[in-house]
Amino acid sequence: MEKIYPFLIALAVLILLYIMWCLIEPFFLVSDKAVLKKSNKINNNDINIKKLPFIPEGASDPDFRFFFFSDIHAEWCPVTAKRVCESIREMNDKSPLDAVIFGGDLISRSSRAAKGYKYLNEVSACCKELGIPFYGITGNHDAKLEDAAGSSGYISLDNEVMPLTSSRTGRSASLAGIPDSGTRKLEWPPMPHCDANNPVILVAHDPDALIHIEPEKRPDFMLAGHLHGGQMKFPFKAEFYILRSKDQLPKKGVVQGAYDINGTVTFVSRGLGCGVMPFRFLSVPEVSVVEICL
């Protein structure tokens, strides 16, 4: 019995360190950059996924430059709106941003919506000060809120299409949005009607929305969140079978970062806050500059 004591003590220390790190990691913030270059679309029902490599700073000449963040879950989000605004200013100073885009889930519970509204209104004020349009989409936890966009200060992309013209190259694109239907009864809205002559950039909270769009209507680009990068990394991606059993793309390897999914070039954010539990492990909160090359 005495021989097992050191093992038990070591195990207890490791568990304590693990829990401490899970509580500390949500306070960090990483500013990432993703470069999405147009690909050739594949119009079939099969799901072909290719992880895209990192493109170094200065290696792109984008048509559009977006600041993208998602999944605040304001009840437990140690990353403050002030820090997000500081990142927006910093990235806009490097090169002007065409838009700031919120990918959904401002809260986890509808009863705490006011906290999420306050958070996004701070971001909205920052965008107005800088003269940058601020767009957003409804996440699954926001579906019950009556007017999240109006209360938060962003322009809703729910079932909408916004025309874009690049100030850099003069090229045109369509910015479209698909809202999430909620946490219980999943329904997938159809793809909004877009100009067939323009590349389409879709914002959808849940990346699984893509596989429910008719192949010939799938967008050229997609920005999404929802997955929190796994939030709690477990061996063999167990978190997506235990905590997110309904999500399909994570089981095929789509978790965080840039992917080519049947020719739709996709970026999935790790998000900012914590969902079910106030923990993160190997999934540091992030805000991202997404550069689109048409």
Image: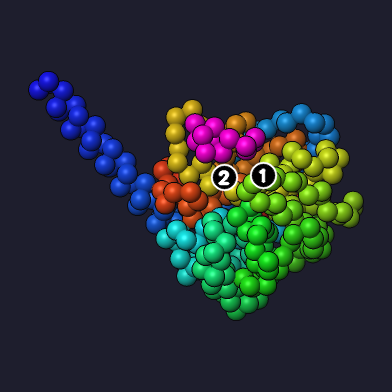
Estimate the x, y position of residue 61 in percent, counting from the top left. Answer: 68, 54
Q: Does residue 276 sit above or below 158 in this rendering? A: above
Estimate the x, y position of residue 272 in percent, counting from the top left. Answer: 50, 56
Q: Residue at x 79, y 58 (%)?
A: 159
User: Which residue type carries mark 1?
Assistant: Pro
* Residue topped by disc 2: 227
Q: How is the image coloured?
A: rainbow
Question: How many numbered marks have been drawn onto this rendered protein structure?
Answer: 2
Q: Does residue 71 sit above or below 7 in this rendering? A: below
Q: In the image, is 137 to the left or to the right of 57?
A: right
Q: Is residue 230 visible?
A: yes
Q: Residue at x 81, y 63 (%)?
A: 163
Q: Nearer the viewer, residue 42 or 184?
A: 184
- Crowd rating for badge 1 (residues with CA inside 10 Å; few <14, some 14–19, many 20+): many
Estimate the x, y position of residue 19 in percent, counting from the top left. Answer: 32, 44
Q: Nearer the viewer, residue 121 or 264?
A: 121
- Crowd rating for badge 2 (residues with CA inside 10 Å; few <14, some 14–19, many 20+): many
- Which numbered marker is on residue 207? 1
Magenta region, residue range: 238-249
Q: In the image, is 72 to the left or to the right of 222?
A: left
Badge 2 marks a residue whose secondary structure is loop
Q: Is residue 245 magenta?
A: yes
Q: Does residue 285 sit above or below 207 in this rendering? A: below
Q: Place residue 137 in its image quadrant.
A: bottom right
Q: Place residue 154 in its image quadrant.
A: bottom right
Q: Nearer the viewer, residue 61 or 48?
A: 48
Quadrant containing the N terminus in the rendered view: top left
Q: Is residue 81 magenta?
A: no
Estimate the x, y position of residue 140 in percent, counting from the top left. Answer: 63, 52
Q: CA distance from mark 1 to mark 2?
A: 8 Å
